[in-house]
Image: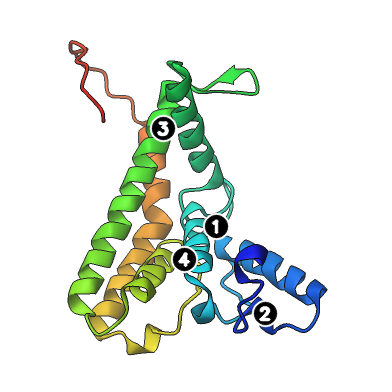
Amino acid sequence: MLLLEWRNPATLGGLPHWDDRLWAAWFQAVTPRTAGFHTVDTGALTMPGTLLTMLLMFIGGGPSSTASGIKVTTFVVLLLTARAFVQGRNEPVAFQRRMSPETVTKAVAVAMASMLLIFVALFLLTVTQQHLDFMDLAFETVSAFGTVGLSRGITDQLTPIGQLLLIVTMLLGRVGPLSLGYLVASRRVPGTRFATEHMQIG
């Protein structure tokens, strides 16, 4: 965040001292996890800074915390799973411990459900809020999903339908991935084991 916004006069570039920029960048990188506070104008962030903030809001904080998002552990499991595939491993490994298939399934399910929720909410917003910029709508959607509270300043320009969509996204973003993760982790349905089928991916 420091590198992306260093020369932006509307954000870090407008601060007089380098240490002020350092602290502001640090805070701006931490607050998307769930806090919602900001020390610089979020609407004035550069496009790379905006995308980085959206990524941090999507990931969220640690497990068992009040932060929303898919959680840091879910993101790490996805990265380790991708690394295991590239290395030709059947199971992801970290710190000389392999991860169970249930953990991988839970992480994939939570991430996919979260991305689907964001896509559907953003799609409906682009249909009903065509007077607003796409990047602003995307930022508001991810912020609502992560219940972060950051905004690029378009909240008061949303129609009642747009505000309702964000409210629903906030609710589902807060309880949806958590409930889905609990369901995948706790549900054990005995049944018939079907034959294995290999599908071409990519």
Q: Badge 2: few (under 14), some or many (20 or more) residues near its Cα, within 10 Å?
A: some
Q: Which kind of residue does numbered mark 3 sit on?
A: Ala
Between the residue at mark 4 and the residue at mark 3, the CA separation in whole angstroms equals: 24 Å
Of the pair 148 and 22, the residue shown nearer to us: 22
Sequence order check, earlier mark of 1 and 3 = 1
Sequence order check, earlier mark of 4 and 3 = 4
- Picture disc at residue 67: 1
Q: Secondary structure at mark 4?
A: loop
Q: Is residue 8 rendered to the left or right of residue 90?
A: right
Q: Is residue 13 visible?
A: yes
Q: Which residue is mark 3?
A: 185
Between the residue at mark 1 and the residue at mark 4, the CA separation in whole angstroms equals: 8 Å
- Picture disc at residue 147: 4
Q: Nearer the viewer, mark 2 or mark 4?
A: 2
Between the residue at mark 2 and the residue at mark 4, the CA separation in whole angstroms equals: 28 Å
Q: Which kind of residue does numbered mark 4 sit on?
A: Thr
Q: Quadrant of the C terminus?
A: top left
Q: Which residue is mark 2?
A: 13
Q: Nearer the viewer, mark 2 or mark 3?
A: 2
